[in-house]
Each structure stands twice: as structure tokens, then as C-alpha cells.
Image (cartoon, rainbow, N blue to C red):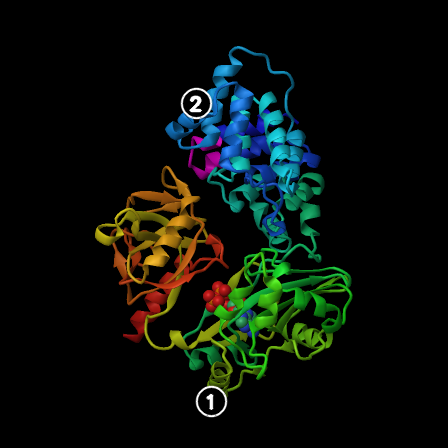
Amino acid sequence: MRFGVLAETFGRMESTSKRLELTAYLVEMFRQTLPDVVARTVYLLQGKVRPDYEGVEPGVAEKMAMKAVAKSSGVSVREVDAQYKKCGDLGEAASVVLEEKTQTTFLVEEITVERVYDTLYRIAKLEGARSQNMKMKYVSSLLNDATPLEARFILKILLGTMRLGVAENTIMDALAEAYTGERSNRPFLEGAYNVSSDLGRVAETAARDGIVGIRSFRVAPFSPVRPMLAERVRSEEAAVEAMAGGSAEYKLDGERVQIHTDGTRTEIFSRRLERITDQYPDVVEAVPAMVKANRAILEAEAVAINPDTGAFLPFQDLMHRRRKHGIEKAVSEYPVSVNFFDVLYLDGQSYLDIPYTARRRALADAVVQGEMARLVPAIEVTSVESLADFVENSINAGGEGLMLKAADSVYRAGSRGKQWLKLKREYQDSVGDSLDLVVVGAFYGRGRRTGTYGTFLLAAYDDENDVFQSVCKVGTGFKDEDLDTLHQLLRDMTIPRCDPRVDSGMEPDVWFAPEMVIEVVASEITQSPVHRAAAGIVRKGTGLALRFPKFTGRVRDDKLAEDASTAQEVVALYRGQKKIS
Ligand code: ATP
């Protein structure tokens, strides 16, 4: 298939932010795509070469890309650089300089999706001393044969700056329409995506086998399952009312790990489904002894422990393992316990549709408890008193509170609902709840903060409409180091205009792609004529906003933007606070 078909579609998509138009362009493109290239098409469309959890990224440096553009177009690196400064994007700059060149030369060969994909994949896989030269060779050879429009998107993918403003939901709408005949089949594709986290594989299944293939899509080791999440509950009384007969478990303060094994190989995925196997070599080594099944997917909270007493240590201690080098040292200094709380798959059978109580029994059978492996402590929810005792025990043991799980609840991958509730101490007194919000813009600082950002525009996620809605501006709680780090981290997310998925009542100095999540607390939630969170839900023409928001110091890099606090949660907090007062 011609790569030009993709490039033309991407070009059209860049000129609109309307979801319906974006979907229509995608449907048209998918209809021209054969099943054996559709997975590759979906990855490229998202600016990737493999699903995120594999961590395979082209990783080409700007300087090198500039050299390749210069080589292919016959102009100097300095000219490419000048054009880059003018356009602000190397992909666009490349299309301008190549445009001048193509007027004088013939294109030799039409490039295909297969060729672009294979080259980008090879580049991503290159390692070692000679890799830079090889990368340069590969990029130049593609650019030599690419049209200016094609070059523009090849470079964007290579540099990680592809931002067409399409969310996974929009892509799934288009796949449903193109391959199953009805956009209303999207929830089935979503279900398949939730248990595989691989949109390419979902797309290929839809293209080959239509809705029948999608409906029989199964969970399998090494494709991470999107985690089931909890809603908040404010008090023991409310918890007992909602969960009598269900279970309460310690909510431990560590890192959620999803362990996949087939008896010989083990992979570990984080809450946001990144492959973190390398951070836990000790766990990987212990898996064959602690899991009885041959093939399994289990969920646990990994918690750092004091090696002398076995007591749980705070979440921060675990963060020492987040490094590329020196992991052995971190592993011996910060040993962990693996506290199992769920089973999603055992020896060929999916456990997702099995009720919690039976899953917990299967989990107890599958895990061999020992020094490292434990089952998360659990009791049946019966009375307010026993629950209050259990909260106390959890907190004394270093936990954050409790997780409550309905006895008959199945595992709903990728969804936050009332089947799981979390009861944390902090929710019990006031509106001081923390929220995880997406940084969508920033305002330049004044005085001591000149030259960096002083305040940030934050948004909650409206997951029904797939929109990030502004909810406050925050400027307090930041240490100077925090501002430096944020400035650095946000550099790669800067975009020239408001992202199509962001609905903001304010115009910041700088816009960001909705990617980074930070934790804030606030004194109150109020109605706001400016901010857009839950607009029209509490009152027509009004949104909700946080009053006196403050950064807690925690960048939630374990969360994707789509995992941020939702507009619905903000509404619930607003209503809850009114009830209390
Ligand atoms: P938080 O910001 O409170 O960590 P979250 O958005 O990551 O929440 P929630 O579903 O709201 O996810 O809370 C559940 C989180 O608590 C899980 O992601 C997991 O890391 C952790 N956890 C600790 N103990 C348990 C347990 N027994 N069962 C499920 N999750 C647990």
C-alpha cells in the first residue's frame, strides 16, 4: 500500500479539530487498507511503531534528522536549521526544503507503508556504537524517495512529534465503522483493547474477522490488561452501606504491578502498562516459585519493605528502582514484597468474567506465600466497627486505607466504577481530597519566576466525550526545583495551539499536548463561569473549578492523561462537599 495514502489522510487531519471530520477521514483511509497492513497503519497514525507497553521507540535525535534532511535535499544543515526555526517543526521544515528539490528531480520509487514501517522499526531496534550511522542511512534512504508530504510525517514519527489530535476512541469509532459496518460497535472494540492494550492487533482482528473476531478476542499473557479502578467513598458508614457482604482489603502504598508469565518468561507491567520488568529482577526470578500455574496474569501491589523487620515502607522508597543503571544496588537496598490481590488469567482460562470471591479463592490457590509473596489482607465487610478497625490496622501497617470490592463483581478492565471503592483517611475530613489533573497550558512567571512557567492550567478528563476540560490555574506548592523539572518535562509536549481534545475557558501563554498528570489538593470546588469541567451539569452555562489549588509535589508519571480525575469525579466531590456543609 502507498504510504502516500496515509500521508494525505494525516495532512487532512491536521487541518481540522472536529471529531466527526477526523473520524470520516480515518474511515476513508481504513477502507483502503488491507488487513495485513492495518496494524502498522494504526501504529504510524499514533506516531508509534509498536504498542506503548513494548517500549520500542524510533528515538532519533533532532540534529541527526536535520543532517538527513540536508543530505536528501542537497541544502546545507544551516538552511534546514533556519527553516526549522521558522516553522517550529522539523517535519514541516523538511517538507518545505524538499518541495524546492522535487521541482527539479524525479521521484525514483513510490514508498509503501510496509517500507516506511519496516525502516522505522529497524531504526527503533538499533543499538550500540554504530547505530547512529545506520540510523542516518535509513532515514536518508527513506527521505530520498519520499514526497515532501510523506517526509513531513516520517520525520514527525521519528522525532515523536506526531500529534493529529485523535484519541484512541476516535480511532476505534473509525475502525468500527470501516470494518464492522457500524460505529455503534465501538464498545466491543474497546473491550478487546482493554484486555490487550494493543490497538494494532485489535484493528487487524476487526479488518480480518469483523465483529465476530472482535467478540471472541481473549486475554493472553504478555499483552497487558488495562487495570480496573475504584471510585472514592468517604466514610466507613457509606462503605458498609455500599459493600455489605463484599470484601475489604488493605490499600497498600506501593506500585501496582501486573505480572505475566508462561513458566519460562516473565514480564511485569505498571499501572499505565509500561514494561517495568527490568526494575524487578528479584521478582522475575521468584515468579516460578511463587506462582503455581504455568501461564498466568496476576495483579499485585509491590511495596518496599524494611529488610530487618519486614514492615512496609512508603511509596517513595520504591522509586529508587526507577533507573536504567545500577538497578542491582537499588534492588538489594530496597527489597520488595509482592502483595497479590487479583488474578486475570490462569492456564488458558480468562478470569475476567469470574466474580471477585471466586477469583480471590483461585488467587489463594495459585500463589505460594513466602517471604516475598503475600496475599493482600482481606476481611468480609460486615459492620462499621470492624471496618474502622481494619482501616486502623491498614494505616498502622503502612497502608493508605482500604479497597472495597463487591462480592459478585467481575474484573472490568479499563474501567473505574462502584464495584471497587477506595476508602482513604484523607477523604474523611473535608474537601482536601487530592485530584490528579492534566497540565494543558502554562503562563510565564514574573519576578523570581521570570524565564520559566509560573502557573499551570489544569484539566479534568471528561471520559464520556473524550475531552480535557480546564478546571483551575495552579501556582502554589511548587518548589524552584519542581518548576525547573516541569519546564524540562513539558518542553516536548509544547504545541502551537490548543489541542483539539482540550476545552479551556482560558488562553494560556503556552499550550501543551494533554499528557502530563500532576496531583493537587484544593480547599473547595465552586461553580465557575470560566472553567469548563463538567460544564452544564450542575448549572447551565457554568463549569466547576477548584478554589485555592496547590501542587502536592507529586508528578503522577504512573498515570496517563486518560487516567486523570474525571469531570464526573469533580461533580461527585462538589456534591459531596455540599452535603457535608
Ligand atoms: P490512587 O491515586 O489512589 O493510587 P489510582 O487511580 O491509581 O488511585 P484507584 O483504582 O483509584 O487507582 O486505586 C487503586 C490503586 O490502589 C491501584 O491502582 C493500586 O495501585 C493500589 N492498591 C493498593 N492495594 C490494592 C488492593 N488491595 N486492590 C487494588 N488496588 C490496590
Q: Which residues are magenta?
A: 12-22
For discs 1 and 2, the disc positioned in front in the rendered view: 2
Residue beneath label 1, please? 385
Q: Is residue 462 visible?
A: yes
- Secondary structure mainly formed by the magenta segment: helix
Q: Is residue 76 left or right of residue 329?
A: left
SS class, disc 1? helix
Which is more N-terminal, label 2 or label 1? Answer: 2
Quarter of the image where the C terminus is located: bottom left
Q: How many numbered marks appear?
A: 2
Q: Is residue 46 above or below residue 143?
A: below
Q: Nearer the viewer, residue 74 or 392?
A: 74
Residue type marked 2: Glu
Give the x, y percent position of residue 106.
59, 12
Question: In the rendering, at what x and y percent does residue 536 appear?
Answer: 32, 53
In front here: 213 or 102?
A: 102
Does the magenta segment cover residue 13? yes
Query: Is 186 displayed left or right of 216 in the figure?
Result: left
Q: Residue furthest top?
A: 104
Q: CA distance from mark 1 to mark 2?
A: 74 Å
Looking at the picture, does residue 522 appear above or below residue 363? above
Give the residue at mark 2. Answer: 79
Q: Is residue 572 magenta?
A: no
Place of residue 241 in the rendered image (x, y in percent of width and height, measured from the top left): 47, 79
Quarter of the figure with residue 520: bottom left
Circle 1: residue type: Glu
Determine crowd level at label 1: few under 14, some 14-19, many 20+ residues with C-alpha closer than 10 A.
few
In the rendered image, which quarter contains the N terminus? top right
Q: Nearer the viewer, residue 483 or 523?
A: 483
Q: Residue at x 76, y 72 (%)?
A: 292
